[in-house]
Amino acid sequence: MIKTANSLESFRHDTNCNDILNIFFGENYSSFVCDGSCSSSVYVYSEKYVMPVSICKKFVFCWGRFLSEPYIYSEGNDSMDAFLNSTCQFLKKAYGIQWIAITPAYTFFNEYPEGAKHVPFGSHVINLTLDEEILFSNIHSKHRNVIRKAEKEGVVIEKGVSDSLISDYHKIDILTWKRSYRTASGEESLHKTVNKLKDNVIIYIAYKDGEPQSGAVFFYNNVMCYYMHGANNDNPVTGSGNLLQWQAIKDMKAYGVAKFSFVGCRINEDKNSKYHGIQRFKERFGGELVQGFLFKKVLSKFYFNLFIFSKACISLLRHGRIVKTQDIIDQEIYKWEQ
């Protein structure tokens, strides 16, 4: 039987669960999500699983997003796929959800709902309980070499959530998105992230002679640190991004964080694509590839198709043509049998 709680505190009260959950279950993240396009968030739970879900409404449309993989908080007989199926049907009936949006890249779903479009996906995860010497030895030799090189050349790492760090990150974020012919989110968006997530977010910048070379935004709590966003100058000093990540890994270990996720790895990616280089950068830090699925599911074909049609009309009015957008599943699904 599926139930919901409007807050994590209510869920804990109803179930006596006091386990430490990842950041995406937290009240800070819930507030952060609901400050955007989503109107509310709830905690969906059964006798065994609990999962945070955002509910977004716009005009006649209503869709949901699973914000984290389910957490097993007690013993029970229901399976993961049964829980996900029941959750989809419950959300459709109780909240009028018309579709489940693509699951975020940082999640670790090892099952998917019946009838959902899905692709294998994963993330490289480092066990931070290992000794620092072992963590460094697990890093690929080429990464270790450029880390040492960056240190010798005077690259320094600064961290925090100050206005100056936000401003410097935004500068190189603009350059990063420009190289893909896209527009950065904006400095205001990063300020909002910092204000909402408070102690669960931190920015790192690698500097050489006062100039920002590489940057990263991490979300974290004691369970796991997630590498959520990254940016680079047009010609960053060799090893600056590697040194930044190594410093973050050491810091998170010192903070008592259990794991470090590099967030996002396409399975069997095209070796000629930009993703191959990005994923090689991540995997060479020595983490384990934790593989699962990304998925999305249509619950009402009529409203979902109407939503797609309305987006096409808006695109036609704004750009004079229909600009098709593809998510990761759209880009990868041709590789996999459904």
Image (spheres, helix red, strand yellow):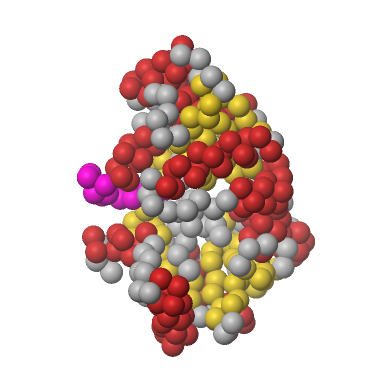
Q: Quadrant of the C terminus?
A: bottom left
Measured from the top left, where is residue 23 in percent x and y? 62, 49
In the rendered view, would you say 192 is above or below 100?
above
Q: Residue furthest top?
A: 152
State the extent of the magenta-drawn residues as a range.
264-273
Above-or-below relation of 332 to 250: below
Given the current orientation, which residue lies at the most extreme front position? Answer: 320
What residue is shown at x 61% (from left), y 48% (from top)? 187
Q: Nearer the viewer, residue 182 or 148?
A: 182
Instruction: Name the quarter where the N terminus is drawn.
Output: bottom right
| Numbered marks: total | 0
Q: Identify whether 301 is placed above or below 272.
A: below
**Is residue 269 in the magenta section?**
yes
Q: Nearer the viewer, residue 31 or 44?
A: 31
Image quadrant of residue 134? top left
Residue 292, placed above or below residue 241: below
Horizontal and vertical percent position of residue 210: 57, 23
Can residue 291 be seen? no
Which residue sits at x=69%, y=36%? 162
Left or right of 250 on screen, residue 16:
right
Q: Position of residue 325 (x, y in %)?
A: 38, 66
Would you say 248 lies left or right of 122 here?
A: right
Asked if residue 127 lies in the magenta stretch, the reply is no
Q: Nearer the viewer, residue 280 or 255?
A: 280
Residue at (33% x, 50% y) in the render: 266
Res 124 visible: yes
Task: State left or right for residue 318 relative to residue 267.
Answer: right
User: Residue at (45%, 30%) from the top-left corner?
Assistant: 241
* Residue 112 placement (x, y as % from top left): 42, 65
Chief SS of the magenta region: loop
